[in-house]
Amino acid sequence: MTDKGKTVVLAYSGGLDTSCILVWLREQGFDVVAYLADLGQEEDFEKAKRKATKLGAKEVVVEDQQRELVEDFVWPAVRADLVYEDRYLLGTALARPCIVRGLVRVAERVGAGYVSHGATGKGNDQIRFELGCYALCPDIEIISPWKDPEFYEKYPGRIELFEYARKHEIPLPITPKAPWSMDANILHISYESGILENPATHPPEGIFQLTTDPEKAPDTPQILTITFCAGVPTRVSVAGDAKQVTDPLEILRTCNRIGGQHGVGRIDIVENRFIGLKCRGVYESPGLTVLRAAHLDLEALCLDREVRKIKAHLSHRMAEQVYNGLWYSPEFEFTDRCIADSQKMVTGSVTLKVYKGGVYVLGREAPVSLYNKELVSMDVQGDYQPPDARGFIRINAVRLREHHRVKNASN
Amino acid sequence: MTDKGKTVVLAYSGGLDTSCILVWLREQGFDVVAYLADLGQEEDFEKAKRKATKLGAKEVVVEDQQRELVEDFVWPAVRADLVYEDRYLLGTALARPCIVRGLVRVAERVGAGYVSHGATGKGNDQIRFELGCYALCPDIEIISPWKDPEFYEKYPGRIELFEYARKHEIPLPITPKAPWSMDANILHISYESGILENPATHPPEGIFQLTTDPEKAPDTPQILTITFCAGVPTRVSVAGDAKQVTDPLEILRTCNRIGGQHGVGRIDIVENRFIGLKCRGVYESPGLTVLRAAHLDLEALCLDREVRKIKAHLSHRMAEQVYNGLWYSPEFEFTDRCIADSQKMVTGSVTLKVYKGGVYVLGREAPVSLYNKELVSMDVQGDYQPPDARGFIRINAVRLREHHRVKNASN
Amino acid sequence: MTDKGKTVVLAYSGGLDTSCILVWLREQGFDVVAYLADLGQEEDFEKAKRKATKLGAKEVVVEDQQRELVEDFVWPAVRADLVYEDRYLLGTALARPCIVRGLVRVAERVGAGYVSHGATGKGNDQIRFELGCYALCPDIEIISPWKDPEFYEKYPGRIELFEYARKHEIPLPITPKAPWSMDANILHISYESGILENPATHPPEGIFQLTTDPEKAPDTPQILTITFCAGVPTRVSVAGDAKQVTDPLEILRTCNRIGGQHGVGRIDIVENRFIGLKCRGVYESPGLTVLRAAHLDLEALCLDREVRKIKAHLSHRMAEQVYNGLWYSPEFEFTDRCIADSQKMVTGSVTLKVYKGGVYVLGREAPVSLYNKELVSMDVQGDYQPPDARGFIRINAVRLREHHRVKNASN
Amino acid sequence: MTDKGKTVVLAYSGGLDTSCILVWLREQGFDVVAYLADLGQEEDFEKAKRKATKLGAKEVVVEDQQRELVEDFVWPAVRADLVYEDRYLLGTALARPCIVRGLVRVAERVGAGYVSHGATGKGNDQIRFELGCYALCPDIEIISPWKDPEFYEKYPGRIELFEYARKHEIPLPITPKAPWSMDANILHISYESGILENPATHPPEGIFQLTTDPEKAPDTPQILTITFCAGVPTRVSVAGDAKQVTDPLEILRTCNRIGGQHGVGRIDIVENRFIGLKCRGVYESPGLTVLRAAHLDLEALCLDREVRKIKAHLSHRMAEQVYNGLWYSPEFEFTDRCIADSQKMVTGSVTLKVYKGGVYVLGREAPVSLYNKELVSMDVQGDYQPPDARGFIRINAVRLREHHRVKNASN
């Protein structure tokens, strides 16, 4: 058991910033445990581990959280059709509470009194990270150097940080830093800041890593079928491939692969951060885009109209909660349970075509659904009396005719 | 002035159904005034006029309502980002109150006491039509043969209707009826019923008329820039074309043409009708899809986060109102005014790329916007103190830590 | 087993209208089973039973539904804080689905193909009654004479109905009909129509039956304590009375008695019916008013702020559902489960004073609550850092300062 | 013109805290301008002015803001039916932005670069005060000693503050401090903290200053009639008093006087502060309670049902905005304009009885209203066809019957 007073668990990425923070924390007298979550990002985890050890980490924990991320964070989001401000699928926001959970687990195991991270002081991630930590572990102390003037005033730019790195034998990146920052996980990659800060100009060619440029995507579309059970994806079948994918992690990977090949899921938006700033974000979320299209479509088949409306309201709330870092909050827990309850009947399959950036629904079916072909048919009357509609309309008009009366009276 | 008691204004389409209704109304002793709205659909209006006259219409009014449709109905929808159940852009629903307005104008001019239409008894259009008429003209009587057992029991299928047509020298359609029904206007075409009633199978090749199949769309994307003033489109510039389009009708036509060529705006959905049935609809709305993408994007740049949230709530309500035929209602009038008020600052331009079914935002700018590059920049501090975020987060955590305390206490 | 084709179950009240309907239904060739629900209204049920039998009912079912009403309908309403249009506690609306359940049970037992009721064609109760029947028993046929021109045109007023009654030896009411109509159950009494139709004049002295006129209520207030468990009332203790009331039915009766003695729960409102009319209603709901005040107060102590907000939104929806007769609907079932879920922590006691029409909360306590005296105290710092609030405010101001910048720029 | 760098405008109350702050600010090297808003609270403003001058204020501004408060802050709240968390009428929250406006006016006149106030670091008022200042004057610096450890650690309790006062010849309060804090203005008085921090015990006898104890209120009720125009109070007539009160300030005073005499408007609640704490507040708002009851009632007569629903949603948002100190925010400005728009038809009069703590509506009328006596009458058919209701119900049942089908299928 480490001395709580002197141990900090650092969310370590292997990059320059958190390497410098690792060394700086040691300078402040801390024992540093580095926590590196494998969320599916491109990374040489073994190399990162050796690096952290070399920089003096007392312990380095590399944890594969991919399955946890998909099952516990992505599936609830898919089930809820989460989307922030009409367009952002929350790829980064969903990963944060997953990392927090891993980090706090380690903090509790080693008895650390502190956690630390390298998120900046203007972004959302600091909030998602810190609110999550406080929620799971109310007494934890958080060290966030980019909000600490002692740190950020000393290293206001790359030059000063490079200087510090050189001085402390922290390996410098070999490739020059891209003129933007990115955050990657199995779900998506986000790109922001740097040259992307001008919302009037579009991102440079070649920025995207998970998705083919739609203009370079295959000329042949790909068809796939996604099956859901109680709102959660349970199977993907890709046309032309006999294999049925049923493992959650593999379902997401398959959707990512197919979506990515066909250029699906790129967006370029201006969004509102929790701290009240507008920022420009460029995202690619191929698999999530495919899954959302499918789920939304199946829901239309299975959910009652009025239940759907209430659920849609809850979904907007939940998207905000997730975006704002409130995954571990009473309101999220409540909303998530309500949405899960709404999905009992959302079971069935949707067939989609992906083609050069687009996702097209081709058809959907459900063992039990509210779609009643006979009732809606124009050719069959079914159990429906057209004259009833007359009364329905006339009663709905009562209020409108009264409004007409009053408008005339008041003119 | 016609005798009110015996005159009916019929919403006439030129097709078999409303031709039969025209004759049937005359059989019931009515003087029939046929009203045929030109909303941009493919139609030989002169021929339709001659046909109605020959069938005994006392007067035939053909009215070009395209400009009215765009300026008074489509622009408020674009300004409000209207979308029904996440996907349907309301192309048919927006046209209905426009026709109703024209029809009621004629009814008032000729002193008719009745209006009539050919919409079926299971659909939304009967409601949009009739609620609109009652709202604008509370004392009007509505004759809707497809809700009248005397009519629909006599003509339960095409065969009986053909028989009736032959008997009354109503010209039969030369081309065989498509195995679905469609409704077209300058905004969009909807396809439903018939073979489309099975939501599991996709629509046949070649059903679409306004949009190229994305797979057959040009290999070269098209770039265009749309300018809005107070939320309303005021200009379109198409890359490679020196002409600036500023006329509202031409703006919509240009967006339709470009969108249509590139296969933009097709959807295939299951939706919930006002009468409580689920139906399957296939729609193509090329121009509206392009305009919505642009407006939504500009709004993200110009609207305050919290105003946007309230506006989004109002937009959901308004989409429902429009879908349900409540354009002429106190709640629509109120909501529309609120949304117009929200758009004062939504002025600027968005540049888009359309390519094989997709619409991609490339950039946006506004003379005055809430986007503050310096404030959000990762490289510049701007008028922002990172330590403030610490307090912000800690205060937001107060509630979460309390929740943790209570959860522990109650376990 | 009765012949389904010829048997109707009539919601029988014992009064003139449903007695006439009973006879009229027999005239139409039906076997009539009279269903009379004992919901706690003042009624000589034995006498009513004999009357129905004498009028030719094939069977008369009198069922005590009071407990069912309280446990299955009132408690969910209390738990949800249901109130329609800010003021109406839904006393009648809650009773309707309870009666419907009983009626359908009988219809199923006797194999009846029809149900009938005496609600008018302009009110809400016809809707609550009929929607409930269709929802529980989709194939049932409903006979509602007051919507049937053959019936209501024959008996447009009391005179014609009296005439009919005399002719068929239906006992006429001995006391003259009050110049208003009323509906009573254990929860409340509603008064409407007749002289109450003028919303400018107040109801006559002496109209109320469950509540003392506040001006004549005792000069000494009464104190009572209500305990809830998971949002549902589980105990009432009345100051000065050693008995602890824990039976649900007795809890409601006690609250009614105390509230009624002290003049609590009268309202006089204009409200909006589902059919689009405004009507004036005068209600007295003593117990429900007391219970609502207590529950609302305890919730403030136990529910997290954001959970409360979401729950409040759901509560508004649910009140509308109940008012509109949608108790047996997918949306009600969903909303009710969500609200039940929100109440897990709403356990504790509230002490109230009732006095001359008012209910005053004196104090509340909960074994586990989010109220943290030390944290909120002005005298103790607790686990709270005042400087954090500075950052909280400054970050919340970011958006406001940007708004100021833009307003200035656009002037 | 004062040197901006060294001048602070202090929101001065005349009490011990802000007197100490005044002196402390001078010690920090500031020129202090004391701003004392007369919002109708009990205060000897001349004496307070002399006191501030004696303590070294460079200038003392006493401003009567009562009219401003009523016309610009209270009337919009009444028009919107504002209430926070179902019960709190926002008496303190409405006064804060009024004071802020006055304070900023002075700061701009004297060219001050700083403002200061004596609100604590755990409350809402600091937020309302500071957000307002930042919104109106983004570059202002705010000095809030109770969030400044240098100050609050020096004076953690009354003893230290008294010590400081004695040392600097700041007059000590003659009467012992009440064991709670209070905030008063023309609208209401709030009581909190101290002995009130225990939510289980009720406030002591005699705490209230604006309202008579209902038990001691007159035995004779008082009747009054309030007239609104476009949602805003324009006249009060008190039964037995020939005078018609039409001046806004006098309207509020009259409602306060009548309400107060009859014990109206006391509440005792637990509420959720913006900073995430639950606190207990005891409030008395006699006039506002009366006005709200009247406005709500008139609205029910004049507003369309669906407009009312949308307006109610906006009202909840607006109450939160006001509570949270966001009066000067883009969302408040937008919401307030929407609500004002909703009120165009809310013109008419409501007659009320106040009696021993209760407000009872006796009747209401409007020159033009949606209430249609003939249409709703049970005795007259009016322009209403009862059989229409059958179709209305049957169409509403379509969805419910489908739900039944699906439930059965899935069991």
Image (tube, coloured by chain):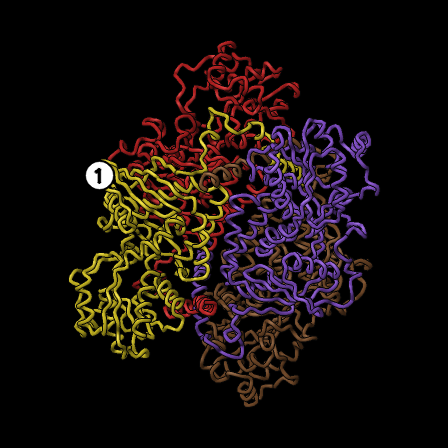
Chain colours: A red, B yellow, C brown, D purple
Residue placed most toward the observer, C369 or D15: D15
Quadrant in the rendering for residue B226: top left
Report if residue A239 is visible in the image. no
Residue placed most toward the observer, C362 or C4: C362
Say left or right for D224 vs D16.
Answer: left
A260 over D315 or under it: above or below: above
Q: Residue at x 36, y 44 (%)?
A: B228
The total number of labels drawn is 1
Q: Where residue A242 sits in the image (x, y, percent)?
A: 31, 36
Q: Residue at x 63, y 50 (%)?
A: D69
Say left or right for C113 vs A244.
Answer: right
Query: To which chain does the residue with label 1 belong?
Result: B
User: What residue sits right under mark 1 in the picture?
Assistant: B218
Tag 1: residue type?
Pro
Q: Where residue B367 sits in the image (x, y, percent)?
A: 39, 38
Q: Residue at x 23, y 44 (%)?
A: B261
Residue placed most toward the observer, B292 or A106: B292
- Residue farthest toward the left in the current orientation of the protein: B174
Q: Where residue A138 sits in the image (x, y, percent)?
A: 64, 32
Mark 1 is surrounded, within 10 Å at the Cα level, by few (under 14), some (14 to 19) or many (20 or more) other residues, namely some
Report if residue C158 is visible in the image. yes
Regarding mark 1 in the picture, which secondary structure is present there? loop
- Residue farthest toward the front in the current orientation of the protein: D1
Q: Where residue D45 sits in the image (x, y, percent)?
A: 74, 45
- Residue farthest toward the bottom in the current orientation of the protein: C167
C163 over A239 or under it: above or below: below
A54 over B224 or under it: above or below: above
Residue placed most toward the observer, C320 or D70: D70
In which quadrant is the C terminus of chain C drawn? top left
Q: Residue at x 63, y 27 (%)?
A: A140
Say left or right for B104 vs C152.
Answer: left
